[in-house]
Amino acid sequence: MPFVGVLPERRHLFRPQPRREVAVSDAAAWRLNPAHRHVYDKLRLALDAGLTAAPCGVAPTDLGLDAADTVFVKPITNLAGMGLDARALPAGEVPAEPGSFWCQRLEGAHTTTDCLVENGEVRWFAHTRGSDEKDAARPIY
């Protein structure tokens, strides 16, 4: 069984081959795990976490934010890279952008976690901390 979703130039990093299909990209994981596709709905995740968020087209000021507050705007689902097209904007400047949402902006260290789950049990974790140096409010590495 192969690793699924490996870019050709990265195949040498994925050895030995697993005994089962293992997704290594968001698109492959979405395809291989239909019961868990909800984890790619970032608007749902933000709301479930108790954050103030809504689809673009719903004004942040209608939900109690000040027009000068900074919010994060990004696609609701983006299997090509979960952070692509994400940016920080003043709440009063959120565009009516189809397929995107805004969310109250969190402060503090940026950490990304990847994990491998087999039959509901986590088998492996990888944590990456974003740098303090930013480009458009996003860590550069």
Image (cartoon, grey):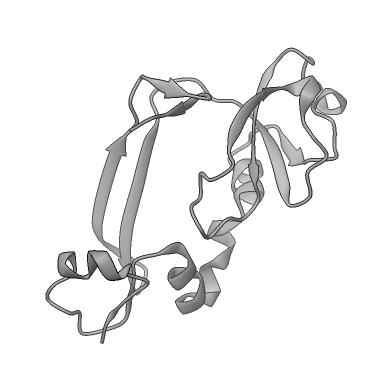
- What residue is shown at x 31% (from left), y 81% (from top)? 21
Query: 54 above or below 118?
Result: above
The picture places residue 117, in percent across and down from the top left corner, at 33, 66
Figure quadrant of the N terminus: bottom left
Considering depth in this image, is 61 or 141 the residue closer to the camera? 141
Asked whether, in this view, residue 29 is left or right of residue 53, the answer is left
Give the image quarter of residue 88. top right
Most extreme residue toward the left is 16
Q: Position of residue 27 (x, y in %)?
A: 48, 68
> In terms of image quadrants, where is residue 41?
bottom right
**In which quadrant will I find the C terminus?**
top left
Placement of 41 over or under 21, stated as above or below: above
| Percent position of residue 90, x then y | 71, 19
Q: Does 105 sit left or right of 98 as displayed?
A: left
Looking at the picture, does residue 90 appear above or below residue 18? Answer: above
Q: Residue at x 59, y 48 (%)?
A: 45
Q: Residue at x 51, y 44 (%)?
A: 83
What residue is shown at x 67% (from left), y 24% (from top)?
Answer: 89
Foreground residue among 94 and 49: 94
Quarter location, residue 115: bottom left
Residue 44 location (% of width, % of height): 65, 50
Task: From the viewer's perspective, tell me whether residue 21 is left or right of residue 97.
Answer: left
Tally of marks: 0
The residue most toward the front is 9
In-image side of 129 versus 66 (left or right): left
